[in-house]
Amino acid sequence: MVNFDRMAKTVAETLHSDSIALYRPTQTTGKYGTPIAGEPELLGEVRCSIQPYSSELAQKEYGLTVQAEKRVFTLPTAWAALGNLARIGDAWYRIEAVPDDRSMAVLLLVRR
């Protein structure tokens, strides 16, 4: 029997030359009950392809009105969730949109 999950991972490792770390934002409460951003929680790293992108292309290709600076293609993962963070090198990005695509995850990112 063919193991499609293993085959997809092998293809992704061959095609995707980049990798990014995905994080979940955390929050603590300040002295007067004010929410304060905490240290992001590392979820893991994923192999991917990163492309420059724009809000205009997001509107044209996906019908989405969002800010976008990068588009990331990767295998579907629960870590690729709206509002999570991506670290590319030393730069931090927030996942602004995850357009529905059953064969791969597409993430639209904006610099944080």
Image: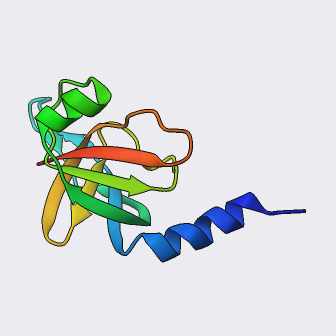
Spot occupied by residue 7 in the image (x, y as percentages of width and height):
68, 67
- For residue 108, which quarter of the picture? top left
Residue 26 in view of the camera: no
What residue sits 17% from the left and 29% below the top? Answer: 66
Q: Is residue 51 left or right of residue 90?
A: right
What residue sits 13% from the left and 70% below the top? Answer: 90
**Nearer to me, 92 or 18:** 18
Where 83 falls versus 40 (above or below)? Answer: above
Where 102 falls versus 71 (above or below)? Answer: above
Spot occupied by residue 4 in the image (x, y as percentages of width and height):
73, 59
Residue 23 in view of the camera: yes
Residue occupying the far right of the picture? 1
Spot occupied by residue 41 in the image (x, y as percentages of width and height):
34, 57
- For residue 60, which quarter of the picture? top left
Spot occupied by residue 18 in the image (x, y as percentages of width and height):
33, 72
**Nearer to me, 96 or 27:** 96
**Nearer to me, 23 or 80:** 80
Where 27 falls versus 73 (above or below)? Answer: above
Q: Is residue 65 left or right of residue 95?
A: left
What residue sits 16% from the left and 41% below the top? Answer: 68
- For residue 110, which quarter of the picture? top left
